[in-house]
Amino acid sequence: MRTSGILMPITSLPSPWGVGTLGGEARAFVDFLARAGVSIWQVLPIVPTGYGDSPYQSFSTYAGNPYLIDLDDLAAEGLLERGEYAGVDWGSDPERVDYGALYRGRFDVLRRTVERLQKTRPDELARFCEREATWLDDYALFMALKDLHHGTPWHTWPDGVRLCRADALSRAHEKLAEDVAFWQGVQCLFFSQWERLHDYARAAGVRIMGDLPFYVALDSADVWSHPEQFQLDADLRPREIAGVPPDGFSDIGQIWGNPLFAWDRMKADGYEWWCQRVAFQLRLYDVLRIDHFRGFDSYFAIPAGAVTAAGGRWRNGPGIDLFRVLEQRLGRCDIVAEDLGYLTDSVRRLLEESGFPGMKVLEFAFDTRDGTGAAYLPFSYPANCIAYVGTHDNDTALGWLETAPEGDVALAREYLHLDPAEGEGWGMMRAIWASPADTAVVQMQDLLGLGSDARVNTPSTLGGNWVWRARPGFASRELADRVRRQMELYHRLPPIKVVPDDYARRDAAPVGGAGIMRTGQFRFRI
């Protein structure tokens, strides 16, 4: 079935409180997607942001981002008073996330909320903590210890807690009990709102595609609590770190700094760490995009302390063995493989063996430097792939037309018959909608006709990334209707479905433009 999606980070939604959240604007965006005939909402990782404000350098592969908790919804539940957050400085630019302002203002507000949650809904909180204990206990203690040590990385902490010695952890639990309970409460609030939004999307016929970073951050609860899963020395420091060699994104390669996986040890215990990680993600999302898929075939190891990636070397990953174990444990998983970058025949074989759809990026198709762009021309796309104009790591369509080499842009304009009357960005989107790809995903910025100022991320750079936000009213009915017509033309409308009341929305928010009506005990999308 031919489908379509829109890539829109949750943080990029408008709100008066500094950042996009899981509340009313997210539900309104679901309504927009349903009206537009778009069946997939692709999001970036919803984990806490870490170094460089990046969702790919998180303190946890499991936890939810506290900044995404909607304050208005908390007020509607009686867990907050509007005056407790309306006067806080959330940043001065409604089109940019100010992470410093969020850090200064959000946690005091959440502490008041958690105190009320503990008093008014203790049973709900207890059930959540019991259900998520396998990761939540470690994460909450990790964050409490991080606060105690003024945010410093765990590998600089005193040996007792750094090495997770039982007696030291027991004392820390006792000393920091209140802070541990706070971080547990924050996660309860987050996942309550996430489940509500996910149910809302299901009821509208919209599937959420999540994003799983391949690596985890060194300064994370995951590495701190399970160092045996990573390539660390006797002092729990990485000998080599993750990155990639020079490619289309960077002439000197990229140093990511993540610890490398101890694949031999992981294989010995049946890849239990990965099975738990993927199973958890598939509880959250309907489709899971796994970043840096080629790392399962071979991964690039860079000596710790290196200034560039030039001294790195390729090593073998687990290959198809891991995915066979995942399928045995979890069944057939709805996974998308991010197979961009430096590819080899063995990576292509792994993708074919896995059966997962890979990714095609139209902006790569017109690279005239080495002749490799032809693989990304739309006529050559297999049906089993996800087609993009550009991803969150690429410029917007109009930004690319302004900044790419002249020859590349000239070729794109000729090949795609781009017409300013239609809008050159729309011409690029039309190319992937018309392609053979089963799924075509466009960035929201391209639908809005935005340039490089709205780019989400520029790899290998620090500062100015992950901050773009849309203006209020961006998801208009007129835009939805224009998109819907394109979905009709290119046969990407979802089928009309009967949705049982099991998927009824849990909140009383108005449906808006999604086109949902109630008839008896079913809901029909019209």
Image (cartoon, grey):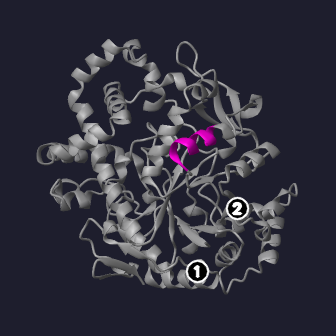
Residue 399 locus on image (x, y percent): 65, 66
**Badge 1 amino acid:** Met
Residue 248 locus on image (x, y percent): 75, 50
**Residue 329 belongs to the span the image colors magenta:** yes
**Residue 475 showing in the rendered view:** no
Q: Which residue is mark 1?
A: 487
Give 425 or 182, whichever is nearer the viewer.
182
Is residue 471 positioned above or below 108 on the image? below
**Residue 87 showing in the rendered view:** yes
In terms of secondary structure, where does tag 2 sit? strand
Q: Which residue is mark 2?
A: 361
Where does the magenta region start and end? 322-331
Question: Badge 1 local density, few (<14 within 10 Å), some, or many (20+)?
Answer: many
The N terminus: image quadrant? bottom right
**Residue 474 belongs to the span the image colors magenta:** no
Is residue 317 positioned above or below 170 on the image? below
**Badge 2 amino acid:** Val
Question: Badge 2 local density, few (<14 within 10 Å), some, or many (20+)?
Answer: many
